[in-house]
Every structure is written in structure tokens, then in C-alpha cells.
Image (cartoon, rainbow, N blue to C red):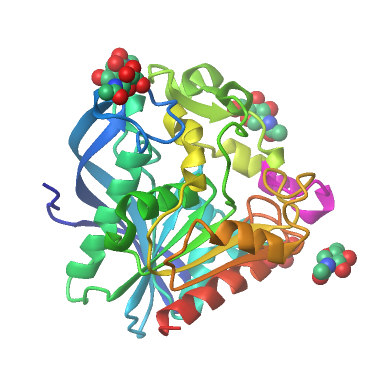
Amino acid sequence: MLLFLSALLSAVRLALGASCSCSATSIPVHVDALVPKDPTDMFAGLKSNTSSLRRVDATYDIYGVFCQPEGVSSDTVQILVHGITYTSQYWSPPVEEFRNYSYAAFACNEGLPSLAIDSLGVGLSTRPANASDVQFPTASQAISQLARHLKTTPILPGARAFKNVVGIGHSAGSATLNFGAVSEGRDSPFDALVLTGSLSVAAGTLPPVNQFGSPARDVEPLRWAGLDPDYITDTDRGLFYPPNTNSFSSRMLAFDNFTKDVGTIGIFAQTPVTSLGNQFTGNVVKIVGSEDQLFCVGTGRCADVPTLVASERVLWPDAKSFDVVIVNGSGHDLNLDFFALKAFDTFVGFVQQFSSGT
Ligand SMILES: *[C@@H]1O[C@H](CO)[C@@H](O)[C@H](O)[C@H]1NC(C)=O
Ligand SMILES: *[C@@H]1O[C@H](CO)[C@@H](O)[C@H](O)[C@H]1NC(C)=O
Ligand SMILES: *[C@@H]1O[C@H](CO)[C@@H](O)[C@H](O)[C@H]1NC(C)=O
Ligand SMILES: *[C@@H]1O[C@H](CO)[C@@H](O)[C@H](O)[C@H]1NC(C)=O
Ligand SMILES: *[C@@H]1O[C@H](CO)[C@@H](O)[C@H](O)[C@H]1NC(C)=O
């Protein structure tokens, strides 16, 4: 059984711009999911028999920052889901110098509300003691439960529930939303998905997890001593930026490194769920940067866009619409380099198109 308790709104307010107000919130979600006993199972249990699965039945608090344009009422809300070792701050770097890198503020100025969340196990959301409780089945169900909550319950006192929920992911956040499309199909609460920094990853093509990260407790004991070693963090974020160092601020890379968070072995190792077909029926677009060093640079995947669209589309046969867009110049972290505003404009364009029913 899946149910929500109540939404708790804190009084924290972050002023982004005159026309936009933001408040921090924490929403309890009940998750009841089957996860593989082995979190390195690349298909997250979807291809396993029941003897290799176990049940996680728990209630978690999911933290988020809700931003809405003042005086504009929207039927659509965006749930923003960061990538591995990031937090909700990916969508709104919380320092003066990088205010103009805020997708939440950009979208708000275009009349679109958003809820940027900290994923399960990350930031200010519940961090289960056992990292193997944080896998795609649990992380994805927590987000889908949030989406259902936003469709039934006003997030702020006196407001209305939303009619449409658009999931916008980045990297592992996109893969988490993608897992939900595979596992829930036509029952997904999402009306549309904007999957940034993500293309399908075939089985056997993912680098080993120790090339990506190390136990967070070893990297920064001051912050993470005592954590289950399957909570990992990375040590080099340069790959998330374009190879051309004139394309981004070195101060952004330093700030990004300084504010990194944790992810889990499961959320890394289960990325090949993105190569499974699904029955999702909403609108879908994948958006990647031409200078993405994980998916484009040196892979030959992004130069021939029609071929790329065709190969990705076969996984989404029932989608109302499907497209892949390459943003020229952007790296893997489309929000954090000098091409960010062009990327934001692309995201908002699709959200507006999807919420107008086309
Ligand atoms: C279930 O999966 C386990 C582990 O992969 C395997 O050893 C076992 O033979 C499978 N059982 C059945 C009935 O397929
Ligand atoms: C996490 O839970 C799994 C399944 O119950 C168990 O096998 C594993 O030992 C636990 N790990 C830790 C660090 O407690
Ligand atoms: C990133 O942070 C780590 C500490 O976690 C530090 O050792 C390293 O020098 C930093 N790298 C950069 C490029 O700032
Ligand atoms: C992409 O950007 C580069 C450098 O900014 C430019 O030289 C190139 O013409 C652009 N390509 C396209 C297809 O717009
Ligand atoms: C933000 O403003 C700075 C300083 O004007 C500029 O260098 C940077 O490119 C801007 N960032 C974005 C994403 O436009």
C-alpha cells in the first residue's frame, strides 16, 4: 500500500527574483518496492526472479524547494531530479555569483512552477542507514509518489493541486525517471518527461563503479565518516564540463566540487535500465550537450541526430511524442556552463509545448 502522510512546509524562503517565490518543504512518501538483493544488478531487479529480490517498505521524507511565479496560476508543475552526487541545488546554485544559472528561476520567470528535490539518500532527504535501500526501484517510487501527491494535494495552503506533472531529470535523475517509465508504463503519474544529460546505456558499456567514485566516508570523513561505504562520491567533476575550459567558469567547477553530495552503488550500477523498452504514454524528449564527455564526445553518437533519434525512439514505442535534441556547446552538466541559458530555453520550450497538450 502506498500513501502519503501530510506535507510539511517550512518557513524558509529564498528570494530568486521579484516575481518568483520559493519555499523549502519536506514531503513524507511511503515506498513499498522490490529491490535486487545485489545492488549491482544492472537491470535493478526488473529481469530477476523473486528469489533474488527483497522488499523495502518504508516511509521517507523527501526534501524539495518549491518555486512558483507570483500571481500566475499554472496547471503544470515540474519535478526536478538531480544526478548522482548532486542535490536540488543543481537547479539553483545557492550563491550570488551563480544566480543566473538557476533553472528554477528561469522557468519561474516563464510562468512555470517547479519542485527541485533531493533524491532518496541525498542532501536533506532521508538517508537510509543501508545504502542498498537506495536503488532505482525505491528512488523512483519515491518520486512517483511525490508526483501523485502534487496531483491530489495542494503543496501550499490555499493553493490548488496540479493537473500536469512534468519530470525533468539530469543524468542519473533522468535514469531514475526512465526507470519509472519502464516499471510503471501507462500507470506513470508523469504527463511528460524531459530527460537531460542522458542517453540509453547498453548493458556492459558502463565503466566499473570504482572508476566513477569511492566510499564517501573515505573521500571526506569530516562530512561522511560512519556512512555505509556503498554511499559513494566522485573525486573529479571535470568530465561533467565541456573539454574546452573556455566554455565554463573554473569557479563553477570549484564550487561544484566543494558542494558535492553522495550517491549509491545501486544508482550508478543500474544505469542500463535506460536500455529497456517501456510503455510510457506521455511526451518524452532527451536533451544532451554536444560536448557531453560521457555521452557525446568521442562516442560518435551525437553527430548524426536522425540516427540517434531513431535508435532511442524504439525504447519508447507508446510515447505521445519523442525527440532527442543536442544543445550545441553544452557539456554533461548542461545547467553549469556558459551555454546554460540556451539549454534552459530548450527545456522550457518543451515543457510549454507538452503542457499545452501537443
Ligand atoms: C533465480 O535466480 C537465481 C539467481 O540469479 C538463480 O540461481 C535461480 O536458478 C533462479 N531460479 C529460477 C527458478 O529461475
Ligand atoms: C543492507 O541490507 C542488506 C539486505 O538486508 C544486507 O544484506 C546488508 O548486509 C546490509 N548492509 C549493511 C551495511 O547493513
Ligand atoms: C575537489 O574536492 C576535493 C575534496 O573532496 C579536493 O581534494 C580536490 O582538490 C578538489 N578538486 C578541485 C579541482 O577543486
Ligand atoms: C556549434 O558551436 C560552435 C562553437 O560555438 C560553432 O563553431 C558551430 O558552428 C556550432 N554548430 C552548430 C551546428 O550550430
Ligand atoms: C552569468 O553571468 C556571468 C557574468 O555576467 C556570465 O559570465 C555567465 O555566462 C552567465 N551565466 C549564464 C548561464 O548565462
Q: Is residue 145 above or below residue 156?
A: above
Name the residue located 59 percent from the left edge and 21 percent from the top edge. 210
Q: Position of residue 173 (x, y in %)?
A: 47, 49
| Quarter of image, res 214 | top right
In front of the other: 77 or 8: 77
> Total number of numbered labels?
0
Instruction: Provide residue 202's location: percent of width, then percent of height.
Output: 58, 40
- Ligand 2 shown in quarter: top left
Q: Quadrant of residue 12?
A: bottom left
- Quarter of the image containing the C terminus? bottom left
Q: Is residue 96 left or right of residue 317?
A: right
Whether the magenta-drawn stretch holds residue 249 is answered as yes
* Residue at 13% over, 51% down: 3
* Bounds of the magenta segment: 240-253
Where residue 129 appears, x then y in whole percent? Answer: 29, 24
Q: From this view, report whether residue 351 is shown above or below residue 230.
A: below
Name the residue at 27% across, 76% down.
163
Q: Is residue 250 magenta?
A: yes
Question: Looking at this view, is 254 or 129 the one in front?
Answer: 129
| Residue 45 position in % (x across, y down) | 35, 33
Whether residue 92 is visible: no
Residue 190 visible in the displayed image: yes
Q: Nearer the viewer, residue 326 or 76?
A: 326
